[in-house]
Amino acid sequence: MGRTEQPSIEQLLRDLAPQVLSPVVRRFRDFAAAEDAVQEALIAATEQWPRDGLPANPRGWLIQVASRRMTDYIRSEVARRRREQVAAEEAERLAVPAEVTESNEDDTLVLLFMCCHPALTPASAIALTLRAVGGLTTTEIANAFLVPEATMAQRISRTKQTIKESGIPFQLPTAEDRANRLRAVLHVLYLMFNEGYTSSAGPQLRRADLSDEAIRLMRMVYDRELDNTEVAGLLALMLLTDARSDARTGPNGELIPLAQQNRELWDRQQIAEGTALLSTVLPKGSIGPYQLQAAIAAVHDEAARAEDTDWPQILALYELLKRMSDNPMILLNHAIAAAMVQGPQKGLELLSALDSDARLTERHRLEAVRAHLLEMAGDHEAALTCYRNAASRATSMPERNYLLMQAARLSETRSANP
């Protein structure tokens, strides 16, 4: 499956970035400046490592370089205020102990909880964490939140300023704080996995680095929260969904929809693990949205063929889920399930209620689903228009190409049967 290949320098740096940012932020307690310093260290690595070879301890190398940048920054700031003596004392105090650079401990989960800062709103904390831990671009984060890129850029900028002005140290949270921040942490990992599983933009349908990292971090959270049913539910959801990854694309990276996938390529070990997790938590009585989504994924995975899918059960689960969340993607999927059980006209009726939802008006998914349901209803002319509209809005090349192919197929059918 290709996951044991030696990572490139670019991939290694991406994996190390959050592990470097965490100790630098903890020591200097200035997130914005530390993020800049780490970026400078990453740039230095891209220039030096291909020429000089990998250092013996890449993570320690990056921490040391970023810490030097931070020390220089502090000295510059203090000098600007004519406080040279303070700068010397600060530089000495902030000297990086050898155990920090030489430790191989993964601080990514620590950074994850640190970013869910008490001075921030949950939405702001999640956006900041996706940037610092997930390495997502502003555009990708905006897509995850269904807001314009400019809006998200302003939000992230304000978030950093809020931390700076709050006076609350950016440090390891207490056990009580971790419990209070857990909900935001789970939402971060959920969005991070989704962006990896279906990339919102670019030439590839999936970014395995993101989805794999989200699963890895989710396992770490689960190990610390064994009694939390939603933690187990989210891990189950990731495993049950990721199990289909190898069947989702063709030899040229083209998108293969769920109904047409070769189910023999699905990872049965992951499905078994996810199903076992779900079977453990569902009887406990406290059911949340992640468990319901995992249950829906399990119903899909249990069907040997697409036509064997238990759509009435899926529709019933979506009925429960939509009472817990106003997420438009849940409402969109509920409309699909209703169409599969009650007919395409019912699905189209439910879609019409989403036409005024500003979160979906500029996105391609609403038009893509409408096109599919119109085709099911036999209205090929309207379906062709919707496929084209959806393709014009898609920013993921595999999704756009798939929609264009559906439009071309309907166009050919129309030409052959005037």
Image: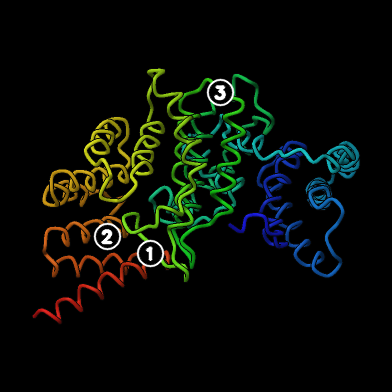
Camera-side residue of 124 and 398? 398
- Image coordinates for residue 90, horizontal then vertical, percent: 86, 39
**Residue at the spot of label 2:** 368
Identify the residue at image location x=86%, y=57%.
55
Identify the residue at image location x=16%, y=60%.
374
Of the image marks 2 and 3, the number of the one nearer the N terminus: 3
| Element type at mark 1 | helix
Give how far apart the Cα atoms at labels 2 and 1 are.
Answer: 10 Å
Name the amino acid type tagged 3. Leu
Identify the residue at image location x=43%, y=27%.
279
Left or right for 340, reference 129: left
Name the amino acid type tagged 1. Glu
- Image coordinates for residue 103, horizontal then vertical, percent: 82, 39
The label shown at residue 25 is none
**Residue at the spot of label 3:** 226
Instruction: For label 1, count other residues whose C-alpha is less than 10 Å away and answer few (under 14), some (14-19) or many (20+).
Output: many
Left or right for 245, reference 106: left
**Residue at the spot of label 1:** 399
